[in-house]
Amino acid sequence: MKKRVCVIYTGGTIGMTRTEYGYAPKKDFIRTALSEIKELDSEEMPDYDLVEYDPLLDSSNIAVSHWIQLAEDIEKAYHQYDGFIILHGTDTMAYTASALSFMLKGISKPVILTGSQIPLCEIRNDGRDNIIAAFMIAANYDIPEICLYFGNKLFRGNRATKISSDDLIAFDSPNYPPLAEVGVRIDLNKDNILAPGKDLEVIKFQNHQIAVLKIFPGIQFEVFENIMTSNLKGIVIEAFGAGNIPEGGRALENILNKAIENQTIVVVCTQCLKGSAIIGQYETSKGLFEAGAISGYDMTVEAAITKLYYLFSLNYDIDTIKKLMVTDLRGELSRR
Ligand code: ASP
């Protein structure tokens, strides 16, 4: 029997058209554009229903409330479809994919996010191929994960990150192999795919205060002291290399002391594209270690941020959150 997928268009370049001020999403355009992709009518393709969000967003404007809307819409329609395709802007696609991976617990159907760097309204565009492949994968393969398809590769969503603002290969998954590669054939890397869940449970994020601090040489930590309030639940530090930060003296000590006082969770990720942040490997991570910071290991910053939202939304105590942050929950972290 022909499969049926639900396509949700949230906005993003793929369905944008030219305006006086640059590209912007246009209501109803995606419906026409999809109907003009004749390959989607083929027997090999699933039937689809299209849901177009209102307003359509440039994905720079995506916020927690939109992640909740997506999770709720998928939950409502879950039993009617064999899979979901989310057409989304590329700028924050990896964040949305990570967020959904935590919110949609126990998923047993594919949810594939895709989009494009060049809109479908242009003669030469990457949107068409991305859509065709996403449809084909959703129709023919059982991948019970939140995935991101782009530039001939299907990635685990919470491992993907945007690596280029203008190449058509815009995403990569530096710390985890692709789930599928699309060439002459569609090659599925079965061993890398998660087992299906039993029942879908949607955990809605609450809007907690989370911050990200990127370390750079010469950083004056006192600039950031004022953000360390008791409202700040978690902070992801993008450290150098394997989790190192400059010595930082009193100002850094003040920040870390405030984190301890306010029970703010400090997660250390690496600003390298590939590899892990492991506190304690070098002496330069001593301050972080003493302040009870935790290693983000090989999680992307997108995954670390959304995982903090997730765990705080479950109202766990601090020790449980710290423990779960370093535990693999949805394939976001390599087992150690
Ligand atoms: N600014 C756009 C967005 O993220 C870029 C894109 O879709 O490629 O919505």
Image (cartoon, rainbow, N blue to C red):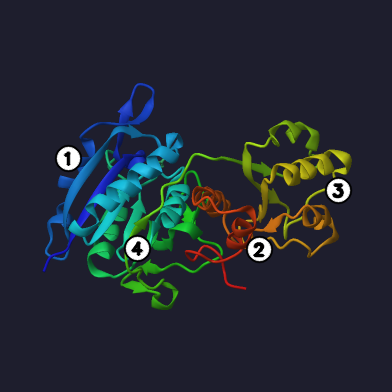
Q: Position of residue 154 (x, y in %)?
A: 39, 63
Front in this rendered view, residue 309 or 195? 309
Q: Considering the numbered disc 2 on the image, is that residue within a helix, a strand or a loop?
A: loop
Amino acid, disc 1: Thr
Q: What residue does disc 3 label?
A: 247
Residue 24 is left or right of residue 323, and the answer is left
Residue 209 higher or lower than 330, as above or below: above
Q: Is residue 114 left or right of residue 244?
A: left
Position of residue 25 relative to residue 183, above or below, is: above
* Disc 2 packing (10 Å; few <14; some 14–19; many ≥20): many
Specify which label sits upstream in the sequence, 4 or 3: 4
Q: Quadrant of ligand 1?
A: top left
Q: Which residue position holds label 2?
A: 276
Disc 2, ligand 1: is the CB inside 8 Å?
A: no
Mark 3–mark 2 contact, CB under 8 Å?
no
User: What is the C-alpha distance between the residues marked 4 and 3?
Assistant: 44 Å
Which quadrant of the figure contains the C terminus? bottom right
Q: Amino acid at mark 4?
A: Ile
Q: Residue at x 62, y 43 (%)?
A: 233
Q: Relative to the observer, which residue lies in front, 290 or 96?
A: 290
Q: Residue at x 36, y 39 (%)?
A: 12
